[in-house]
Image (spheres, rainbow, N blue to C red):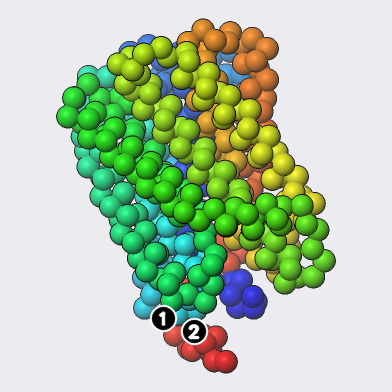
Amino acid sequence: MSSLHLQKWHPRHWLLPLTLGGLAIMAMFILKTYVPHPGAMLPDYAQLYSYAQTQGAIGYLLLLDWTLFWALFITTSLLIPLFLFKSVQFLRAGAHQLSDKNVMETAGWFGLPLSLAMYMNVGAFGAVMFFGLNTKQDDILWPFWLGLDLVIALMAFGQYVWYRQIRRSADNPEQYSMVVPFAIGFMGLNLAGPGAFTENATVATLSMGASLTFLALSVYSFFSKLPALKHAFQHLWMRPQDEQTRTRVWGHQINLATAITAVNVWQIILLRNYLNYGHNFGEFSIAFKNSLTWGMGIILPLVAITLLALWRSGFFNHLLTASKNYLFSLGQICMLVSSYVMTAMFTGTAAKAGIITKYGLVWNVAWVLELFLATLTLIGVGLLLYRMVLLNNIQSWQTEEVSQALKP
């Protein structure tokens, strides 16, 4: 990859607003867990401030967390229109000709519906906190939220159909980006949200039906391309020496990280829908313990192995080197965010179900793990923001630059 390519905006940059939104969701989970908020789904500022005044240093950390949530929300609000503008410039300059034949590059366009869907999540939670909405008032919000979620999900489905067609004429049709099942699955997770909080039967039914439909499509797209996972595991423990091999190995390793993200999303969808409607389906604790076994017992060790493999292959060193391609790190951050959300959901739900004790040993160990995942995510996002935005490494393509790059 030339130095010119490293300075330019690419479709895969759309994963940056997604990761910022994911970090905001992390901050929201902390507020939801530790700040009492009777009469509301999430704590508003008055509830937070009055509680923080009684908690000493912990109170200041909670206020810092609240500030981080809104800083991330505002930054994402600025990045999305900026990236929409750069997407238009990218297409007008014909830069898509540089990537249309590469199925790993074209998968970056799935970051657009992913970022919009995540922004809808963060925006809805922000509205609940800002206005201090209770359950009755929330019913004004959820039908509107479901409608927008359906539009974004249909956008992702259209991209999925386009991606299947473009792979047939690609230079590397044997490859497959796990961003695709992750993106389709995330639409299912997003669609489960309105049904989680509404008391409207129509909204709840549409929410669950659409959510499970996209879950099924995600599972199909995942298992129809299992050879991509085979390549990922074959390259997992390699320590490449030359630059070309290193880039290829990183690509396979991050494809595994994105596959882990997709599986995390499936588990969160199932748990979210079960929490919505589980009282109709039987014993709660059995389903939860199964989710806990698969989620915590298999995925989190696999996350640790993947992070260790990335360290062995020299992946983390390249984040500090301005001349290297850093787009791969977006997939790593998606894995960290989804693992955090999955762990936080399981921890909070287990405490409510009485399976673990709040502030007990298992609870505290889980939150130490979540803090570790959040710290890694914050460092990665900070580096990306610095290099992409402050160093202006997301410059727009010019027509003459594209023509020059297309020359053999």
Q: In this view, does 280 lie above or below 398?
A: above
Marks 2 & 1, CB-CB < 8 Å contact: yes
Q: Mark 1: few, some, or many residues within 10 Å (few <14, many ≥20)?
A: some
Helix, strand or loop under label 2:
helix
Q: What element carries label 1?
A: loop
Task: Using the rendered view, name the quadrant where residue 175 is placed.
Answer: bottom right
In the rendered image, the quadrant that contains the C terminus is: bottom right
Judged from this view, the residue extending furthest toward the bottom is: 408
- Report the amino acid beneath label 2: Val
Q: Position of residue 190 (x, y in %)?
A: 36, 39
Q: Residue at x 31, y 21 (%)?
A: 277
Of the pair 58 and 177, the residue shown nearer to us: 177
Q: Which residue position is annotated with label 1?
A: 94
Rendered location of residue 291, percent (x, y): 51, 25
Q: Which circle marks residue 349 in the picture?
A: none
| Left or right of residue 233, residue 19 in this image | left
Q: Specify the quadrant that holds the N terminus.
A: bottom right
In the depicted structure, whether residue 205 falls above or below residue 109: above
Which percent across, then down, holds residue 130?
A: 35, 29
Give neighbour class at mark 2: few <14, some 14-19, many 20+ (Cα, 10 Å): some
Look at mark 2 in the image and give the residue it sits on: 402
Distance (Cα) linking label 2 and label 1: 7 Å
| Residue 329 placement: quadrant | bottom right
Residue 223 higher or lower than 96, as above or below? above
Mark 1 or mark 2, which is nearer the start of the sequence?
1
Q: Residue at x 60, y 27 (%)?
A: 296
Residue 157 visible? The answer is yes
Name the residue located 32 percent from the left edge and 55 percent from the top edge: 157
Q: Which of 118 and 162 is in front in this view?
A: 162
